[in-house]
Image (cartoon, rainbow, N blue to C red):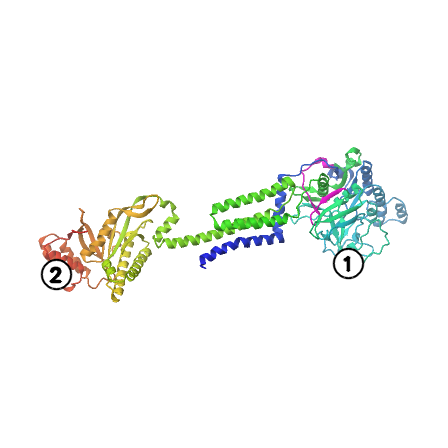
Amino acid sequence: MTKKNALAHAGIFLPALVVLAGLLVLLGDPLPVQVLRNGMFDQYQRWQPRVYSPQPVRIVDIDEESLARLGQWPWPRTRLAELVDRLNAAGAAAIGFDVVFAEPDRSSPKTAAQFWPLSDDMRRALAGLPDHDAVFAQHIAGAPVVVGFTLEGASAAASALPARALAGNGAPRAPARPFRYIEAGEAPAQRVPIFASAITSLPQIEAAASGNGALSFVPDSDGVVRRVPLVLRLGAASAAGLRSVSEPASEPVPRSASDAAPTPVSTLVSEMLRVGQGARNIVLTAAPGAAGELAELRIGALTVPTTPAGEFWLHYTPPVADRYVPAWKVLAGAVPAEALAGQLVLVGASAQGLMDLRFNALGRVIPGVEAHAQALEQILSGETLRRPSWATGLAALLIVVGGLGIGMLAVRVRALIAASAALLALALILGGGWWAFAVGGLLLDTLTPALVLIVSFVVGSLFHHLLSEREQRWMREAFSRYVSPNRVRHLLEHPEAMALGGRRQSCSFVFTDLAGFTALMEGIDPAVAVSLLNDYLEGLIGIAFRYEGTLDRIVGDAVAIMFSAPVPQADHAARALACALEMDAFASRYAATVQARGIDFGQTRIGVHTGEVIVGNFGGKTMFDYRALGDTVNTAARLESLNRHLGTRLCISAATLSGCPPETAVRPVGRLLLKGKTQALQVFEPLGSPPDARYAPLAAYAAAYAHLSDDAPAATSAALAAFRDLLAAYPDDPLLRLHGRRLQEGERGDLIVMQEK
């Protein structure tokens, strides 16, 4: 398998790796993903908050005005007893306190006697006064009252708990339990959070209450309350002390954690529902086919869907004033009885100084008691938010199908098509999640599939880009074998240059031809001849490309090179001459090497000319060719062929020489009048470095040529004598032979009229 094919096959597995990673993230559910997903659910609620519909739920609010009218918190429990009496008399179905009565009422005379230095007479007098806690317990005993307790984390040690949370034997004291849990299914509470200990209300208050519920929330890592628990569990060490208030107090209490398992306990919301219906039992129902996962709670006539952890998702409403009744108005008798009859009444505080404030999903700060109230409203109205048991399976399916599909598209097709498909898939996934929330109250995890899809698209696109780069590089390298690399590079950087048409531009041209190759083809094995030609052409073209020349054409054994097109080159004439000299040196060495093998490989003739041409794309819409048109091109080709008549290997025009450095070593050939032309062209022969040993010294040749260029008879005689003397010393110098022959034949001057092309 080639490297290119191996990369292409690797692209098939990249989307699969991304999908696998996405599935691991889905199952592991790391905290950053939770935060992003919860943020998306919050946004759903901001777009579509729950519409408030009046339900038999009210909050008796210990607000700032109530504190201003009745005094700072905590109020005497005799006042709370009065509040209970008024609510009970109005016909409240249940009265729940979002307060823990964990300490004795310090405003009570009996309690004050414990804290102040008093005489015996004063103590006896105070002892005869009613105890506020006892009064409060008496009043709630005749009313459907739910009191609360708080739960503390698993890391809390018994020795670190406040004294009010400890039983007489020093062990953590558990809350009373005037309810009974019945489990339906296999271990339905397995995933319900466990707490180590509880801070409870006073025993006499708990014993008098009809219900006892945990006030604790389990907020998310950002502190937002999105769910309220309906059931929690108390750890084994504390659960050992749990008993129903109806059970005998003398029942033996296990002392070790091994004697009791974590025990379910109610929360304020579930107790309000139970007491409000006069129910005794709460049924925990496990999800079908999912051992250890809670599906719902049945409380009296109500069935409440929950998370596997026993929580209820809140769908918040904007602030509603009708939900609240100020506590001072209730105590003042200013609230009509019908406004409270049959209501589930929660007593809590909105006053900022009492610090019972929470963040909700709408981005607002609300009293903690409102979260309980909104949960009760939702349950009674049947408007619930749910994360169905199949939500994870759906998310996994979307990850697999979407991640693989978009990833494969990104690897295989053009970026625009893949991006369009990815955007469409994202719109369908995220839009489907919003639609499920808006229509069905479903909380589906579309964020994780969307993130996997985005990552799969990005990874696939990057890989596709890598493949495209490799393919372009391969095509550029392959195309460069047919077209000059600078031409390929220019077309890639300037696609507009592919348009038909041309422009005027000054360029330099190098034309080469191999003498006698046709005859050579007839005399040796064609395969050998082709091999020799390929090596020869590869050497010439390689030299041209090193000087950033553009290959104009190859015609048999002839090569045409163009400079300053398509990319303009200020030094194109000097480049052309340097390229021609190196080509000449290479061709001479190559011919000598081949001739040493007994093969009559010919001499290479080179012509160089500079001038203005029309450069561009010529042809039609189906196929066109990039080339230069103009007399300059024809003249360069004619200069190459003139070498055959002049006996030289390399000729350049004065136009080319004018663009070369002044120190360029050349000697004049003459003014050549090409066939069909009316103006003579000054032509020069460049000298290599070092000059050919067969050639006359440059100074001596220049002196002889100076006589030649003068048409005077005396100068002609001097020229004839000078060239005759030089020929005697350098008989193999081609220009000496040329001019010597011309002078002997009676010609004079340096104008040479060409009769052939």
Query: What's the residue type where badge 2 is placed?
Result: Arg
Q: Is residue 311 magenta?
A: yes
Where, by quadrant of the figure, is residue 382 drawn? top right
Where, by quadrant of the figure, is residue 24 drawn? bottom right
> Where is residue 361 drawn, in percent x and y?
65, 43
Q: Is residue 666 left or right of residue 163?
A: left
The label shown at residue 620 is none
Bin the neighbour count of mark 2 within 10 Å (Cα to Cα): few under 14, some 14-19, many 20 and up.
Answer: many
The label shown at residue 724 is 2
SS under mark 1: helix
Bin the neighbour count of mark 1 within 10 Å (Cα to Cα): few under 14, some 14-19, many 20 and up.
Answer: some
Residue 167 visible? The answer is yes
**Residue, disc 1:** 257
| Magenta-colored span | 301-324
> Where is residue 336 drawn, in percent x and y?
78, 32
> Where is residue 5 drawn, in percent x and y?
46, 57
